[in-house]
Image (cartoon, rainbow, N blue to C red):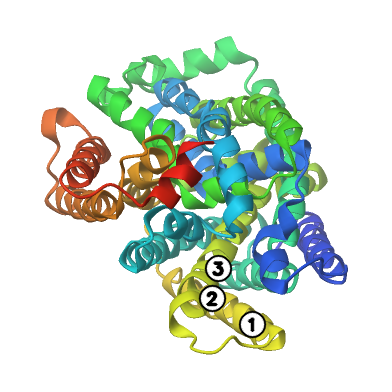
Amino acid sequence: MNPELLIPLVIYLAAMLGLGCWLSRRPVEGSFVQDYFLGNRSMGGFVLAMTMVATYASASSFIGGPGAAYRLGLGWVLLAMIQVPTVWLTLGVLGKQFAHIARRVNALTINDMLRARYQNPLVVVLAALGLLAAFVATMVVQFIGGARLLETVTGLPYEGGLMLFAVTVLLYTLIGGFRAVVITDAVQGVLMLLGTLVLLAGVLHAGGGAAALFAGLADIDPGLVSPQGPDGFLGISFMLSFWVLVCFGVIGLPHSAVRCLAYKDSAAMHKGIIIGTLVGAVLMFGMHFAGALGRVLVPELTVPDKVMPTLMLAVLPPVVAGLFLAGPMAAIMSTIDSQLIQASATLVKDLYLNYLCRTPPSPTAIKRASRLVTLGLGLVVLWAALSPPEMIIWLNLMAFGALQAIFFWPLVLGLYWWRGNATGALASMVTGALSYGLLLHFGIKPLGLHAIVPSLTLSGLAYVLGSLLSPPPPSAVRELFGNT
């Protein structure tokens, strides 16, 4: 065990936990549910930008993405830059509409928006079940990423790193709720940015500059400096699929979309778009470029997902590496806390309070239930993370696609097409989930495309046909969603 690396990381984890405890002691404005799950819609522009970036830049981005770049070379770096417009797309397409309507119907979750738009319990229940299933998979990815990071840099066994990481995230999310999540996300976003820049500078210095590292990649395999990657892996069909999966389709991710309910005003949204896009561009390029160049410096890695922490150990002094390993740790923590709080909101607010609770519970009972559900979900994910796969990026992308196949059209067309109704939403969700699951399970790739492309196409057609073949939504719904 290396104390020069372990001590800064433990201090960082303790600081995040302390911040969550401090935020939990602030007076609650309004109801506990609104404060715990949405932070009373008080986010400013900088916090909005950093929580959007930090929520999106997950273990897949900081651990799995660079691992894929390590294996596939500079072509994957170019491919990863497709993700740059994600903050702009999410806030631009959903932000203003979501915020306006959410305040009118007092929506605290994405399922609250679906409930107000479609007036159908089955839509909400199916959406909740789909969200929970996909979030469990993506949270498992984050737990694995955090454990592998601690395992690589501190010498802790995988299970020990998993426990240390899980306990920290669970405690500050459990205690502080949404407010703790977004404020710690802002801090973690800054650390991610600094850690990425320091690591990339260290890699370039250790390798003698970009030209020398490019030559080293070409010596290993000329495909590593080709846009198509080794053996032409990164073809047109793969690139189109990736664009849909990690850029265009991100609009349908509930844990990103919920940020559109929580910012303070239009000025905060516009500031968030600019800052979030710029920071996201630097992070995506820096992380993946360092991972690709790392193939020259540490060519014998058997687990590509370990490239980022291994590079930090190789090119930075131990104390500096310990400080800036908080960057990838921040990326992982900031995603899982967002998904954990959203999954808890789904169970407590969307299912229990709306459909299962016959008499309104007391505020104390709601508080207890919210925290117990958060703890229970965390323990389930912890158990599932005890058996990790070799590369986490594919599991993360699979869960991403499932969320998009279920939520994309009901969210987007629900906002922008007045004729959409509950029949269309149900048809879209069922078609998207079934087609995505079947295509993935049987390995079917029409025209070489990832399952998300035909699944989104089919679910979009199902939404339109289902809506046109059934009565239009009630006039009250058309007025609420049509005049924004």
Can residue 142 be seen here? The reply is: yes
Query: Who comes first in sequence, dot 2 or dot 1?
Result: 2
Determine whether the residue tagged by mark 1 lies in a helix, strand or loop. helix
Neighbor class of circle 1 (other Cα within 10 Å; few <14, some 14-19, many 20+) is some
Q: Is residue 259 left or right of residue 224?
A: right
Q: Which residue is mark 2?
A: 348
Q: Considering depth in this image, is 180 or 397 the residue closer to the camera?
A: 180
Q: Is residue 206 left or right of residue 406?
A: right
Q: Amino acid at mark 1?
A: Ile
- The Cα atoms of the two marked residues, 3 and 2, are separated by 5 Å
* Mark 2 touches mark 1? (CB < 8 Å): yes
- The residue identified by callout 1 is 366
What element does badge 2 sit on? helix
* Residue 158 in sight here: no
Residue type of the residue flagged with mark 3: Ala
The image quadrant of residue 252 is top left
Give the structural element (helix, strand or loop) at label 3. Answer: helix
Q: Nearer the viewer, residue 346 or 317?
A: 346
Q: Which residue is mark 3?
A: 345
> Which residue sits at x=77%, y=37%?
46
